[in-house]
Each structure stands twice: as C-alpha cells, then as structure tokens.
Amino acid sequence: IAGITQAPTSQILAAGRRMTLRCTQDMRHNAMYWYRQDLGLGLRLIHYSNTAGTTGKGEVPDGYSVSRANTDDFPLTLASAVPSQTSVYFCASSQQGGSEQFFGPGTRLTVL
Amino acid sequence: AQSVSQHNHHVILSEAASLELGCNYSYGGTVNLFWYVQYPGQHLQLLLKYFSGDPLVKGIKGFEAEFIKSKFSFNLRKPSVQWSDTAEYFCAAGRRDSSYKLIFGSGTRLLVRP
C-alpha cells in the first residue's frame, strides 16, 4: 500500500506558467487536503475536499484551484504561477474531517 | 478565531535532556489534538493524538502529551531526547464535529546535539 503519492517531487517553473500538482491516495479516505509549508508559517490549508465531487477553500486559496472527480485523486492547479507560490506543497487525506490526516511526501515548487 | 500557538520556535538540547514543547489552542467546541513530526527532508508523520479519555497520551518513540482543558494546552514531552529526535514538531487541532479542518501551529525546530 503506497498511501499518498505526489508528483512531481520537485519542479522549477517560470512565472506565468500553468502547473498541476498531482495527488493520489489508495486508502479510500473521504477527505483530502492541500497545504503549503513555508518557513516560520507552518502548514497552511489551501483547499480541501470532504468527499468526491465537493471542494472548499482553505486559509490561502488565491491563485490555486482543485478538483475532486473521484475518491482517489485531488490535483492542485496553479493557473498562472507567481514567485510567492514558491513553497513545499503537501497533500493529505483523512477518513473524515477532524480526524488524523496522512501526508504525502511533498512537492517542492520553485517559481522564478 | 481558531488558532494553534507554539511558543518555542527553536529548541536546542543535548542528548539525554528532557523535552517539553508548548502548544496552546483557541478553538470553540470539543477538539481533537495532534502532534506531528517532520524529520529533515521527510513528510509529516503522526506522533500522537488525543480524541477523548485519559488526558495523558502516549505516542511513538517515547513521546507523550498532556491535554489540560483548563489551560487550552497540549504540551509534548519526552524524558530523554536522542540525536535522532532532531526534527520539526507541529501541534494541530481540529473540531470533533468539523467537516474538514485541522489548524496547525507554526512548528518548533528541535536540534539535539550528540
């Protein structure tokens, strides 16, 4: 069982380009989340999904979009990347909201 | 507003020293509480969690945490740290009836010197 996989592991991106970060879980968890981790700020929630077909905005949603077409996949899209989106992005999932979250290995994104 | 505060941003200890990392939360309603650890270059892993029952929770690798409701605190402790405990530690809180959300603290970087 892989748990949560994320792709790519790292990426350098020119500003203005579109980028999709992929996240797949094989635990059949209902809820999935995207966080960004920045030094001194901890983890901040970007978007979440309680169940397939629904999504919601977290603490820092601007510049990002998500979709949840099925239970397993939860891609995060940057429509037009900006340097302030340079960060480490973690995908997570949980069986239900408010319970333990399991994290993926992260994607290190650099926007130049 | 809901928040989780970790007051120690950086902690440096020698091996065998005792550890206590502070965590306070501001959250309406009944909460679930968590401590996660992130070793260098790795993703977050759960150390321990509190949902209900005994307020003294034991986790992996000798860590424990105590939930003190009156102080809105969930401090992490370990009697004797090892070099391998060098990592960043995150406290998190989520409402027990929440649809989705965990709020994370800003993290505490622990360096254990051999």
Image: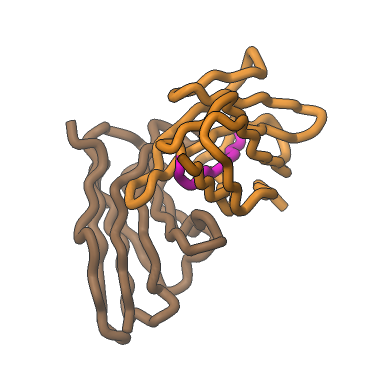
In the figure, the shade used to draw chain A is brown
- In the rendered image, the vertical position of residue B102 relative to residue B29, given as above or below: below
Expressed as whole percent of the image width and height from the top left, the position of residue A11 reads 23, 70
From the viewer's perspective, tell me whether residue A75 is left or right of residue A38: left
Residue B88 colored magenta? yes
Task: Tell me, yes or no, if residue B24 can be seen here.
Answer: yes
Residue B17 location, quadrant: top right
- In the rendered image, the vertical position of residue B35 relative to residue A37, given as above or below: above
Expressed as whole percent of the image width and height from the top left, the position of residue B81 reads 52, 31
Q: Residue at x 54, y 19 (%)?
A: B58
**In front of the other: A67 or A81:** A81
Q: Quadrant of the C terminus of chain A?
A: bottom left
Q: Residue at x 39, y 67 (%)?
A: A87
In the figure, the shade used to draw chain B is orange
**In front of the other: A57 or A5:** A5
Q: Residue furthest right?
A: B70
Magenta stretch mostly in which secondary structure? strand
Expressed as whole percent of the image width and height from the top left, the position of residue B49 reads 53, 27
Q: Quadrant of the N terminus of chain A?
A: top left
- Which span of residues is magenta-colored? B86-95
